[in-house]
Amino acid sequence: MTTHEYDVAIVGAGTSGCYAAATIANAGLDAVIIERKDAEEAGHIACGDALKGADKFPSAIPKSKIEPAFTNTGVDHGRFEIPSHDTVLEIPVPGELAVIDRLKYGKLLIEGAEEAGAELHYDTVVNDVKQTEDGQVTGVVGKRKGDPVEYDAEVIIDGAGALSLLQDKADFEDATFDTNVRYSQFCSAYREIVEVDEEVEWDDALVFKPTERAAGYLWYFPRTSTEINAGLGFQMNEEPMQMIDDLKDDLRDREEFENAEVTDKLGAALPTRRTYDSAVAPGYMAVGDAAAHVNPTTGGGIAGAAYAGQYAAEQAIEAIDAGDVSEEALWHYNERVMEHFGARYAGLDVYNILSTAVDVDDLMGLLAALPGRKLAEALYDGKTSMGPLLAARTAINSFGYWRQILDFYKVKQVAEQVIDHYERYPSSPDALEAWQRQRDELMETVYDVTGAEPKY
């Protein structure tokens, strides 16, 4: 068996993995990205291609490096189509938006990591982790081009995606690493790249449309005015092929897709849950989809993954320099994630929980009744407010959905309480258990208010 030694080994050449590797290499440490795909296929990842926060990326890979993959920077709002109420909601989306060519973006990320000094090992499938008797992760084992190989490192960064195999193989019994993870907290996503003859009228918008079940939605994101990323996401407890038929039926019914050509098809799993309570263990950190760094209401996660990669790498550098890669030495990574987006995603997860417990027609009626800007705040920030005049106007426009509106505001209040609790995330692993108990008490209120089955 061939053994390689590095300061840090990163599993997965996705967004978080590449930013982590570039950050490590820029600091003068040895970094390797272990990627299961070959050089030609690496970077080809199922994605909606919509990038929120396009103006905010870590500097380890300069923004100028990835900008050539930004194919549509003219998108500035969401368009929610609600056929059951003959309504289209135009909803502003905060922050800079772009739609990207995900394959080109993936290739440029890999180039950026290599230019920073990281090594790329393609065709390498990781199938196990190495740990000491006291639980410290010291490496990974796999096959490279069919031959046995192992990687020894001071720190392993897991960027292997949703439901990472590494987390199944590692023993986290004595660590704080979040193991409260199951399939029902994830969705399957499927997308097609569709080329149309005529320019679409909505090339400045991200288009969303409900499926026949509340647990899924369709999207149409314009890479250009004639190249559309058409896809859907659905909770793991739904029948996948039945849901994909919803997309195909909708494509057939839309005039703009007449005579369209499908140029690519791809699917993947995606977390639609709160960020992991802790994504660290001795010698080990998880980033991106592998730690649920995804907005659970929209599925967006590119910018968050980039920063998670940077935060994990910076903490690894500090720990290696101090000669201490214990859980406590890596803990500040958790704090930075929670401060940046983890608390907000925990609040947004409350709305995701609500969607599993309401009738789809009631949910669409509720969406149609809410002011667009306030709905945008709920979907992207987790918090929103409404003055008396606007509340009265909403009540008038929402006759027949007052009960749902009342329920929404109850959910809003508890979502904000969850965010406030996450903003008090503990500064050491010793305080995590007490913090979790308080959070779980809040979640009981969430289930009571939404009527949903427990998610965790």
Image (tube, grey):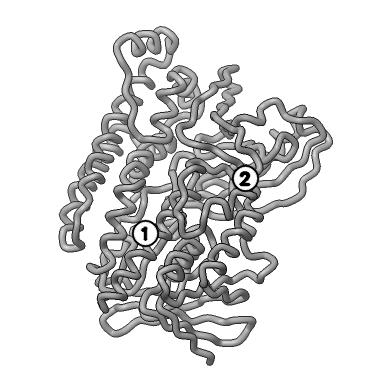
Q: Distance between the residues labelled 2 and 1?
A: 24 Å
User: Which of the 4 image quadrants contains residue 112?
Assistant: bottom right
Tag 2: amino acid? Phe
Q: Measured from the top left, where is residue 323 in percent x and y?
A: 26, 79
Q: In this view, does 101 lie to the left or right of 447?
A: right
Q: Is residue 120 left or right of residue 412?
A: right
**Taking the image as drawn, is residue 213 in sight?**
yes
Tag 1: amino acid? Tyr
Q: Measured from the top left, where is residue 145 in percent x and y?
A: 64, 81
Disc ID at residue 311: 1
Which tag, 2 or 1, sits closer to the chain's start?
2
Q: Name the residue under label 2.
A: 70
Residue at (43% x, 64% y) in the render: 23
Disc ID at residue 87: none
User: Which of the 4 image quadrants contains residue 254?
Assistant: top right
Residue at (46% x, 74% y) in the render: 31
Q: Is residue 405 above or below residue 256?
A: above
* Disc 2 and disc 1 in contact, CB within 8 angstroms: no
Q: Measured from the top left, where is residue 318 in percent x and y?
A: 30, 69
